[in-house]
Image (tube, rainbow, N blue to C red):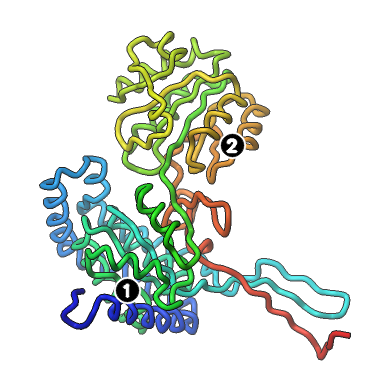
Amino acid sequence: MDDAGGSLQAQMSAMGRGGRDGAMALRMSDAATRTRAIEAIAAAVRADAQTILAANARDVAEAEASKMAPAMIDRLRLDAERVEAMARGIEAVAAIPDPLGAEMDRWDRPNGLDIARVRTPIGVIAIIYESRPNVTADAAALCIRSGNAAILRGGSECLASNLAIHAAVAKGLVAAGLPKTCVQMVGTADRAAVGLMLSGLEGAIQLIIPRGGKSLVARVQQEARAPVLGHLEGVNHVFLHASADLDKAIAITVNAKMRRVSVCGAAETLLVDSADAQRLLPAVAKALRAAGCELRGDARSRALVPEMLEATEQDWQTEYLAAIMSVAVVDGVDGAAAHIAAYGSAHTDAIVAEDKIAAERFADLVDSAIVLINASTQYADGSEFGFGAEIGIATDRLHARGPVGAEQLTTYKYVVRGSGQTRP
């Protein structure tokens, strides 16, 4: 997209109008048509794999030349396995139940009115994201499944990849008899396009979803003229309660941190109960260091594991996205919950405990979108929740929290059936 065919504002306004048309087409379509579209997109991604990989190679080369952080390049990079995983993820969305028209609740009133709360699309959703080209495929599939039109704007660092994936999306829509405007991609790196999307495109956009770093999310939340579904960074914690089984503590902590350090579900801080830190911390720290993780601890942690670097105040609030973990010794569940409340991002936090009462108290006290008991934080993923895919992990408290799948991209309306009632 450039200004040769008119101003950027005119082109973005046209995308808004196209989004409205696409949303209406999806609302009028049936579940089978939406399923065919999603399956056709998966087939097109597989058929266009070499084109997608070639485009991604250009993006990665430019990112490396610009000295982009390794964690960000890992998010950006595609290979044959990741493209196939993208296609399988799209197929998983096609296989989940269509949420539209589902009755969430239904009841009768004494006056004979029959009232139902029914799932319905939101309308046109703008999704602004960075680095991960697979978001293009996930967002397209989830929006189609939920009957919403999508206007996508990925980061400039993955523009070629996103355009190649979007071309496959367009092929799948056409194959199912749906208009291309059901899913549109902003084809320019001009940051002014983001500002225009945040304006709401003359009322066309009903919801904005940012997925990226703190600065992107902050800008969207400050400037958006439409509702925002926030996805903040993952400053996630693993808390080892005094009752924790040592083998579980080691396995869960190492997996939570080191399985893939660049994902938002990676644990960034280890909290250890002072009541049995001497048993737990040295062994877990040894396993983390053996896996290549640098540790930065508070005074009580370093007293038990002197090899740790000294943690600073900044460490407790940092999403490293790297093989680095901060460590603190805290006093029981209440101490862990207080630390998480002070420094966490309300994303994902876990406890390892054999004491069920302590585990449930942790779940009650920690107000994060996802709280896990005796499981790795790396399960913070829509596909692991059975959603097929996700657009992100919502850390807001309204509309949706946690993995945002197709059902979370719907709203509801009330359908009231009567037999001639009039209100006195």
Q: Nearer the viewer, residue 22 or 357?
A: 22
- Give coordinates of residue 159: x percent, y percent: 21, 62
- Amino acid on which disc 2 is placed: Val
What residue sits 49% from the left and 36% below the top? 344
* Disc number for residue 221: none
Q: Quadrant of residue 334?
A: top right
Residue identified by numbered label 2: 366
- Give coordinates of residue 236: x percent, y percent: 45, 36
Q: Nearer the viewer, residue 187 or 389?
A: 187
Q: Residues within 10 Å of mark 2 (few under 14, many from 20)?
A: many
Specify the quadrant that holds the N terminus.
bottom left
Q: Number of numbered discs present? A: 2
- Give coordinates of residue 390: x percent, y percent: 43, 56
Residue identified by numbered label 1: 184
What residue sits 42% from the left and 72% below the top? 200
Q: CA distance from mark 1 to mark 2?
A: 38 Å
Left or right of 317 in this view: 49:
left
Q: Quadrant of residue 363?
A: top right
Left or right of 315 in this view: 371:
right
Helix, strand or loop at label 1? It is strand
- Amino acid on which disc 1 is placed: Gln
Helix, strand or loop at label 2? It is loop
Q: Earlier in the sequence, mark 1 or mark 2?
A: 1
Left or right of 138 in this view: 2:
left
Q: Is any atom of residue 389 visible in this view?
A: no
* For residue 264, above or below residue 249: below
Left or right of 162 in this view: 90:
right
* For residue 294, above or below residue 131: above
- Give coordinates of residue 338: x percent, y percent: 57, 29
Q: Nearer the viewer, residue 128 or 134?
A: 128
